[in-house]
Structures are given as C-alpha cells and as structure tokens.
C-alpha cells in the first residue's frame, strides 16, 4: 500500500510541475540568466536565492548515483504532503514511503557503499517518517500573504524569526525536561525503537543486501497509472466525482483512521447543499466550526484537570498526534 500510494504521490507532484511549467521556466531563467522580463520583486525570496539554496542543500555524503533518486523521493514526500494538506484541509499526513527505502527499492542496496549507507542512516534525522513538516505551514502563510497589500519580500523576516525561535525553544525545552525528569521518559523517539531504527536498518541492509525490488516498483506503477487516469478525468470530464487525492492519501495515516468522519462530513455537506443550497451551507458553518472549537475546549479542560488532580499521570487525547 505504501508503494502504491507513493506512485500516486509521484503523479500528483509531477502533474503539479507540468501545470506550473511556464512559471518554473521563468524561475530558472531568472535564477541562471537574470532575465529582466521575469519579475520576482514581490516574492518572499528571490528566485535566484530559492534555486541556489535548493542546490546547496542537495549536497550529502551519499554516492552521486543515489542522490538524484533520494532527493526526488524527498521532493515528492514534502511537496506531496503539502499538496494533500492544502487540497483536503487535513492537519497532518504521513509520507506513504520514505525517500530512503524508495531509492533503495529503485536501485537496490547491493550497489551502495558503507559510507553511503551510513549517510542514509544519518538522513533520517531530517527526513523520516514524519507527519508534521513545516512545508504546509509555509504554503498556507504564503497564500495568506497574497491578501496583504505590501511588498512580500519584507514578510520573510517574520517567518525566519518564527522558525528560529521555534527551533531554539524546542532545543532548550527538550534539554531542560531531560535533566528535570530524565530523557528516558521521552519514549521511543529518543531511546526506543524509533531512535534505533536507522542503525538497526543499516546493519540489516549491510548483512543482507538486495537488488532492485521490482514488486514495489510494480505497485508504484499501478498507483501512478490509476492516479494519472483520475487526474485526466478530473480535468477533462466535468461530472467525474472522484478526486485523485483520495486515492493517493486514503491508505495513509491518519486518513485511514478518520476516513469515516471524512465521509460523514461529505454526506452532511451534500445533504445540506441539496436541501437548502449555498445559503443553508453558509448558515451552518458556525455550527460545525463550533464542533471543532468544542473539541479543543474539551481537550484544554482535560489538560487542566490532569495538572491539578493527576499530576505526572495524565490521560491521552484521541487523535492528539
């Protein structure tokens, strides 16, 4: 399922590139040839900074033949997650397949040196099984900036300050709580299976290397073909009801846990629109926003109750991760 969804994500991202090909062509003309006909004065960063920043961040200790496939997988992961969140309204979603195994499936692990495999293990520190990346937040921020009638280049400073403050606060709080309560209480991400996985996986791949994995590649191809078909139908057939994002994201966590709620909301929206039209839909929005706010208020009250009557114990909140 992960390979199939990865194929779907690849098509979603590549179709996005195809639709933006004119804009991307202008970006690269501005970055490499300083084309004066391309205006980037109102972007939060210049096109030249963006392109050469991407190139600079592509330097790793991996073998050169592995880097393009790995970076392509990482690009699909970050852009695919951002596209799905932007189009669906989900808070978060995990990647269907991390770029490390994706690249190994495509080219095999038996052709990788020990140095490359160590570099791959280290890459899990910044590109791994994550469901909350900064890309969706940045995409939403830039979209909101379109409503501000000022030069957007000036708005990059608040983003950089917010990112820097968040990183420093996270470092400081993690170290402080580790000394206060013991870092062993953090759970698997610091000392358990999640922390050991990159190195256990490195040892496993070194002892038992494999060649190109054609079965996962076949499932990627199936996922890509179905998604491409859905994409064509979506843009060419007005009555086609199925969105390709649903096929791409449906098997991926947390969508597979909240799929009933998604379909329930879809059914309610369809009924309201059919019975009362757009006027009833707009009138009902405060009620459903109130349901969301009520969930957070309830979680906040339970947090206060836990701090007063259950210090050091607490209770989990459903779907809080």
Image (cartoon, rainbow, N blue to C red):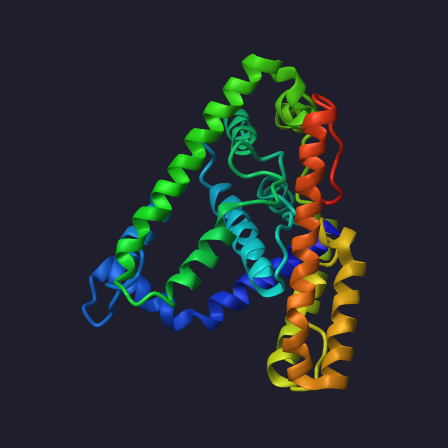
Would residue 318 be seen by someone viewing this image from the given angle?
yes
The residue at the point 21 percent across, 72 percent down is: 37
Query: Of 154 and 58, which appears nearest the observer?
Result: 154
Would residue 221 be seen by someone viewing this image from the given angle?
no
> Which quarter of the image is occupied by the C terminus?
top right
Q: Is residue 188 above or below residue 2?
A: above
Please give the count of numbered marks on the rendered protein.
Answer: 0
Query: Of 300 and 193, which appears nearest the observer?
Result: 300
Q: Is residue 270 above or below residue 300?
A: below
Q: Position of residue 208 (x, y in %)?
A: 71, 28
Q: Position of residue 97 (x, y in %)?
A: 65, 47
Relative placement, left or right, of 12 versus 192 is left
The residue at the point 69 percent across, 66 percent down is: 287
Q: Quadrant of residue 190 in the image?
A: top right
Relative placement, left or right, of 128 versus 290 is left
Relative placement, left or right, of 122 versus 167 is right
Query: Of 19 and 285, which appears nearest the observer?
Result: 285
Q: Position of residue 4 (x, y in %)?
A: 71, 56
Q: Quadrant of residue 281 in the image?
A: bottom right
Q: Position of residue 67 (x, y in %)?
A: 47, 42
Q: Quadrant of residue 132 in the image?
A: top right
Query: Of 210 and 154, which appears nearest the observer?
Result: 154
């Amino acid at each position: 399922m992960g390979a199939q969804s990865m194929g779907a994500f690849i098509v979603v991202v590549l179709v996005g590139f195809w639709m933006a090909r004119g804009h991307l062509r202008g970006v690269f003309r501005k970055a490499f040839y300083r084309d004066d006909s391309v205006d980037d004065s109102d972007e939060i960063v210049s096109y030249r900074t963006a392109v050469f920043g991407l190139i600079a961040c592509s330097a790793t200790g991996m073998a050169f033949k592995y880097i393009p496939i790995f970076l392509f997988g990482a690009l699909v992961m970050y852009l695919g997650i951002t596209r799905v969140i932007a189009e669906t309204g989900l808070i978060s979603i995990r990647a269907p397949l991390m770029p490390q195994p994706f690249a190994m499936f495509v080219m095999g692990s038996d052709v990788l040196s020990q140095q490359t495999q160590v570099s791959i293990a280290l890459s899990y520190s910044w590109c791994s099984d994550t469901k909350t990346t900064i890309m969706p937040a940045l995409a939403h921020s830039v979209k909101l900036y379109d409503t501000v009638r000022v030069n957007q280049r000036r708005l990059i400073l608040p983003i950089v300050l917010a990112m820097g403050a968040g990183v420093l606060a996270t470092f400081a709080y993690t170290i402080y709580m580790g000394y206060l309560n013991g870092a062993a209480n953090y759970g698997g991400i610091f000392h358990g299976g999640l922390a050991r996985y990159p190195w256990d996986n490195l040892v496993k791949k070194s002892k038992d290397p494999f060649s190109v994995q054609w079965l996962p590649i076949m499932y990627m191809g199936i996922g890509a073909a179905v998604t491409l078909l859905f994409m064509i139908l979506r843009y060419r057939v007005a009555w086609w009801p199925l969105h390709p994002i649903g096929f791409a994201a449906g098997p991926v966590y947390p969508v597979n846990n909240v799929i009933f709620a998604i379909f329930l909301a879809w059914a309610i929206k369809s009924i309201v629109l059919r019975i009362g039209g757009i006027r009833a839909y707009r009138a009902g929005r405060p009620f459903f926003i109130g349901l969301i706010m009520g969930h957070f208020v309830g979680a906040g009250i339970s947090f206060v109750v836990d701090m007063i009557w259950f210090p050091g114990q607490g209770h989990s909140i459903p779907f809080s991760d």
